[in-house]
Amino acid sequence: MDQKRLRVRYLFDRARRLNSTQLFELARQVKRISKAPLPVIVLDMLWCSVRYEMGFRDYVVWDIRVLNGRERATWMTHPKAFRLNSTLNGADSAAIVGDKIRFLTDFADLTRRDWIDAADAPVDELRSFLSRHSRVIAKPARGEGGAGITIYDTADIDDVEAWRTSLVEGDQTLLEEVLSQHPRLAEVYPDSVNTVRMITYRDPSDELHVIASVLRIGNGSVIDNFASGGMFTMLDDDGVALYPGVDKQSHIYPAHPVTGTQIQGFAVPDYPEIVEMVAEAAKRLPTVPYVGWDIAITPTGPALIEANHNSSVFQMKPSASGIRTGLLHRYRDAIGPGVLEKR
């Protein structure tokens, strides 16, 4: 499908699904940084949706209200990311990387963890799996955004068959051991496994481009996902945090509120090994060149968590970074002007 048709389809779907209550709720969040009347903010959000192909939450999260037109045009957006996935990745991309069990099987040498499918495994195998691990994580086999994830202490599971039944009913049949993270990352926040999201593009000559790299940090939860209460900060090309942490509610954290660890300047351990591992993994997905990789760093090296064919977009809001331009240029430099041509 050509780019104009993709954009028209997105705008049509957006108009059809427009939730005015949500729109005004997001506009009220913008009032924190703007003195403009609420109707003016709403109209500006609608204008940016058409002019810059920008989601309403994009407008809020990246402080778009305070930027001028030239600055607004520099931001990558989630609708543009949707077009990248639809244009660059094959029709089989969701089946290849969206099925977590298939992914764990295909990348077994890079995941560094034990797992089992509770829906299919005999009860004796399930008991054996639980006996090997003090804590396990249960998740949907095809979930996104950190939804439906629970961590269990295996010592608390008395009736394995009844527990398995509850997992099947709750669509949490993929069980994995809980990885131990590198001590340096535990210093930032110990109660979740803090991960790196690395967005990459493998071009037709097989060169891997790291478009964006992010450290995701938990905050009051067992998972670090931004959509589930966690925070993130952008990393430079050496894996060092460039800015404070930011969460979904636009709170800015120079230091982690639980541990007091400074976020800006934090160096992710084993970063060169992360890049090397992702480069190897990318070669195995010939029909999925545009990927958002999730990586944990264990005491013995990086472990691949999952791959996302429809990765979220990560950029740092101007109020946290002091920088008023986005990362669209990094996407264009990696992918070329064809898919993300200026309009």
Image (cartoon, helix red, strand yellow):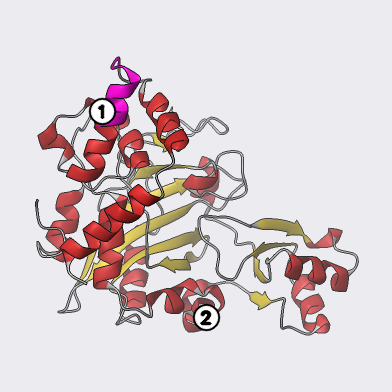
The furthest residue to the front = 16
Q: Earlier in the sequence, mark 1 or mark 2?
A: 1
Where residue 135 appears, as percent x and y from the top left, is: 72, 61
Q: Is residue 40 magenta?
A: yes
Where residue 123 appears, as percent x and y from the top left, is: 82, 81
Which region of the structure is painted magenta? 35-43
Quadrant of residue 174 in the image?
bottom right
Q: Is residue 293 magenta?
A: no
Does residue 219 lie above or below 292 as drawn? above
Does residue 162 lie above or below 222 as drawn? below
Q: Which residue is mark 1?
A: 65
Quadrant of residue 72 in the image?
top left
Could you tell whether 64 is left or right of 263 in the image?
left
Characterize the local packing of mark 2: few (<14), some (14-19) or many (20 or more) Cα atoms within 10 angstroms.
some
Q: Which residue is mark 2?
A: 102
Does residue 20 lie above or below 99 as drawn? above
Characterize the local packing of mark 1: few (<14), some (14-19) or many (20 or more) Cα atoms within 10 angstroms.
some
SS type, badge 2: helix
SS type, badge 1: helix
Q: Are marks 1 and 2 in contact (CB under 8 Å)?
A: no
Give the residue at x 47% y 54%: 195
Magenta-colored segment: predominant secondary structure: helix
Whole-angstrom CA distance, mark 1 to mark 2, is 42 Å
Quadrant of residue 173 in the image?
bottom right
Where residue 97 appears, as percent x and y from the top left, is: 44, 74
Q: Is residue 211 visible?
A: no
Amino acid type shown at disc 2:
Arg
Give the residue at x 14% y 29%: 68
Amino acid type shown at disc 1:
Arg
